[in-house]
Image: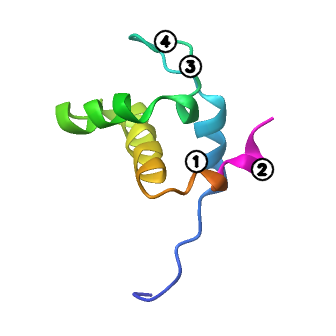
Amino acid sequence: MENEPLIPNRELLLQLVEMKMPFGQYKGTVLCDLPTFYLEWFARQGFPKGKLGMLLATIHEIKLNGLENLLTPLKK
């Protein structure tokens, strides 16, 4: 189990390309389209609790590691 490859969760990735930011300066922006500096601000200040925070932390990691191409086939 320890050396199993990580397989992206399709449902989680779909949420990143469909869910919109519910508040703040970028309210209405799809999570995957949030600017990196905004995600970095959350990383410093602390991501919100719950599902939104988990999704923001996930998109931050994706962008930080240059893996945005994982989302390309899911965008409509």
x, y (%) of residue 60?
41, 44
Type of the residue with mark 1: Leu
Q: How far apart are marks 1 and 2 (CA)?
A: 14 Å
Instruction: Quickly name the residue at label 4.
Output: 27
The disc, 2 or 3, on the residue closer to the chain's N-terminal end is 3
Where on the picture, by quarter, is residue 37? top left
Q: Which of 37 and 21 is in front in this view?
A: 37
At horizontal 28% and vertical 32% (from top left) the residue drawn is 42
Dot label at residue 29? 3
x, y (%) of residue 49?
29, 32
x, y (%) of residue 13?
61, 48
Where on the picture, by quarter, is residue 53? top left
* Magenta part of the chain: 71-76
At horizontal 47% and vertical 44% (from top left) the residue drawn is 59
Q: How far apart are marks 2 and 4 (CA)?
A: 24 Å
Residue lying at the far left of the rendered structure? 45
Type of the residue with mark 4: Lys
Q: How crowded is mark 4: few (under 14 residues within 10 Å), some or many (20 or more)?
A: few
